[in-house]
Image (cartoon, rainbow, N blue to C red):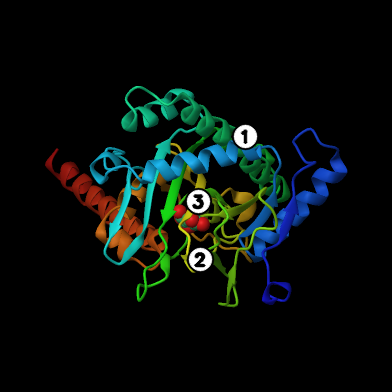
Amino acid sequence: MGSETSPRLPFIDFSNVDQNTNDLDWDSTKSRVRQALEEFGCFEASFHNISSELRTSLFDSFQQLFDLPMETKLKNRSMKPFHGYIGQFPTLPLYESMGIDDATILEKTESFTKIFWPEGKPELSTAIQEYSSKLSKLDQMVRRMVLESLGLEKYMVEHMGSTYYLFRVMKYRRPETNESELGLKPHTDKSIVTIVHQNQVDGLEVQLKSGDWIKFQPSSPNSFVVMIADIFYAWTNGRIHSPNHRVVMSGERDRYSISLVALPKAGYVIKAPEEVVDEQHPLLFKPFDASEFYQFYGTEAGQNAECALTTYCVRSHRVAEQRSRFRIRNFGRKQRLS
Ligand SMILES: O=C(O)CCC(=O)C(=O)O
Ligand SMILES: [Fe+2]
């Protein structure tokens, strides 16, 4: 009953939109995307390129994956922070997740499945790769629309070429009696864009700019939440919003969800283009190296910061200033010595 009146995320239909679509459909979708991302930082996309068989087979396999013994799950390791198995947090007992780097590449998804099934599991590695490749097209359309609508076309090739995809699968077990229902603490994502998809169990909530929370209730099994994250917020100099969100569990069933996460490649320097910086929009973040930001985010200080990106940028510029003062002092000393 309540669902008729409760606020919903903006809904944007991509079923007839692709990069070769006619200008009228492309332009009208683009203006809806821009509006939604300015106001909500996310929207519900209806996207039909992923078949229900593919979705069902993925979620069935993930159930088996999380049922494996803990020592096996822990073999999903990565040198990069938050790329491997995450879970067993005393404060977040419902949550665990696993990640596959570069999931649009078949060899990478094969290496992932071989961790758990040494003889291989070709249906699953192929399904993860196919899902990631197909859904990456939605991310690319959305980012293309954002860049076009901000007049940043000339950065398109450089920007798109500087990103790759991480696939994460999450399990939130149902809370036991007297256990907190919090599945995942409120946070903003630290990537460029995240696209979330779930099985039938709801739980994702997004915070509006007003401070109110709204529950994501998918309109159909073809719904995906497209969400802007901090790196894209910084790169567009705050022209689009990076929303706070969380997962709250209720009901009797475990929840499984998948994120396809667009991330900056190593060494990509996040520098807001001059076109989005002016008097009304002063520069929010000085240019920074995304990989260094992730190293900071992996530390205790990064985890405890209210806004990791702001704290990182303030710190790194303090360090840069100290370094340059040191260089000037030493340069003066060298001059005197010679
Ligand atoms: O499971 C979800 O619906 C959202 C997950 C999420 O916010 C995240 O992994 O950053
Ligand atoms: Fe998130």
What's the amino acid at mark 2?
Asn
The residue pinned by badge 2 equals 244
Please indicate whether residue 177 sits to the left or right of residue 198 in the image.
left
Ligand 1 closer than 8 Å to the CB at disc 3?
Answer: yes
Asked if the residues shown at circle 1 and circle 2 are in contact, with their CB atoms under 8 angstroms apart, the answer is no
* Coordinates of residue 169 in the picture (x, y in percent): 45, 46
- Above-or-below relation of 188 to 235: below
Residue lying farthest to the left in this orientation: 337
Quadrant of the image occupied by residue 241: bottom right
Q: Can residue 178 be seen?
A: yes
* Residue for point 39% across, 41% down: 65
Quick one: 324 or 16, which is closer to the camera?
16
Asked if the residues shown at circle 1 and circle 3 are in contact, with their CB atoms under 8 angstroms apart, the answer is no
Q: Assign a secondary structure to mark 2.
A: loop
What's the amino acid at mark 3?
Ser
The residue pinned by badge 3 equals 257
Quadrant of the image occupied by residue 186: bottom left
Q: Can residue 189 be seen?
A: no
* Cα gap from disc 1 to disc 3, whole angstroms: 17 Å
Mark linked to residue 197? none
User: Tag 3 or tag 1, which sits nearer the N-term?
Assistant: 1
Which of discs 2 and 3 lies nearer the camera? The answer is 3
